[in-house]
Image: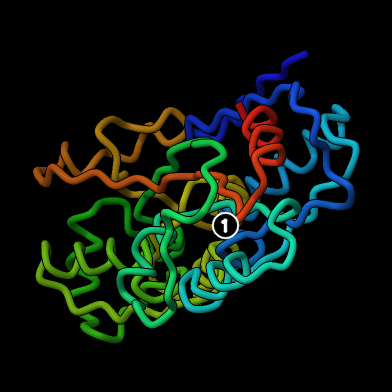
Amino acid sequence: MSLGVVLGLGLGFSVAMVDSAAAWEPKKPVNFVVMAGKGGGADKAVRFIQNIIAKNKLSSKPFTPINKPGGSGAEALVHVKNTSDPDHTLMFTLNSFYTTPLLQPGLGIDISTFTPVGRMAEDTFLLWVNKDSGITTVDQFVKAAKAKGNKWIMAGTGKNSEDNILTNFLNKTFDLNMKYVPYKGGGRVAKELAGNNANSTVNNPSEQLGFYQAGKTRPIAAFTPVRLPLFKDAPTFKELGTDFSYFMQRTVVGAPGKSKGASAYYQGLFK
């Protein structure tokens, strides 16, 4: 039996799951660790997958999301590395799975020891503003951000993260001095913008979708090669003269030391 599901949020996010032929099966609930806080793109994806597994009875045991957002994923990496039960521990990763161990060598994380399970998707980014700002173009955004200097708040998820990288790109490319303020999850970041506690964000589509549909926020440019179907009025930075695209990889990995039977089971489940 197989199941293919597409999450239509302009993400190109597809999940295909099949029953594993491996003899091994979970003996207890599976801890599904998220390298970010609740409400963000990774958290939404994990809870979506959790629901699909439960609804279609693809596993005899439930998958339990566990958010570990601290230290730009460091908390999650250390937690999974040190788990006493690798066969019942998975992690849904962000780009920080690769960057955080490089930026924080003291963690002692070797990502090559983690068990590969499946590459699930590539997520996208847009530049967002509060609709009340009246800003509808990147030119207007640059003018407003320059006028406020470091009092312009760019909210994002974690330090040295994807959001931080994109903020640095915008600061350098447009000669801005925006202040980057990190939070523990994309959901909280989206709320800060919708509540006018931040001036801009670079949220994934799923994180801002509810506020966008409610008329609270507006995407003014996409960090993608072509325009996103759900946000056709938002030009790409390439269209605007800056050929720059950036994506978030969404991958499932297992804890180091996972048995061959468990590895085969999860790889089959997420195939």
Q: Residue at 71% of width from left, 37% of height from top?
A: 261
**Residue 58 locus on image (x, y percent):** 82, 29
Q: Nearer the viewer, residue 181 or 69?
A: 69
Question: Number of callouts in the render?
Answer: 1
Which of the 4 quarters of the picture holds residue 24?
top right
Element class at badge 1: loop
Q: Is residue 3 visible?
A: yes
Relative to residue 138, is residue 48 drawn left or right?
A: right
Q: Residue at 37% of width from left, 58% of height from top?
A: 98
**Residue 107 locus on image (x, y percent):** 44, 78
Q: Residue at 9% of width from left, 43% of height from top?
A: 241
Depicted 218 relative to depicted 189: above or below: above
Q: Quadrant of the C terminus?
A: top right
What's the residue type where badge 1 is placed? Pro
Q: Residues within 10 Å of mark 1 (few under 14, many from 20)?
A: many
Q: Is residue 191 visible?
A: no
**Residue 13 locus on image (x, y percent):** 53, 33
Which of the 4 quarters of the picture holds residue 194?
bottom right
For the rendered model, the colour scheme is rainbow
Relative to residue 247, is residue 2 drawn left or right?
A: right
**Residue 56 locus on image (x, y percent):** 85, 27
Q: Nearer the viewer, residue 116 or 22?
A: 22
- Residue on which disc 1 sits: 256
Q: Nearer the viewer, residue 145 or 83?
A: 83
Q: Nearer the viewer, residue 157 or 89?
A: 89
Q: Quadrant of the N terminus?
A: top right
Depicted 157 relative to depicted 131: above or below: below
Q: Residue at 31% of width from left, 69% of height from top?
A: 102
Relative to residue 156, is residue 178 drawn left or right?
A: left
Point out the residue furthest to the bottom here: 151
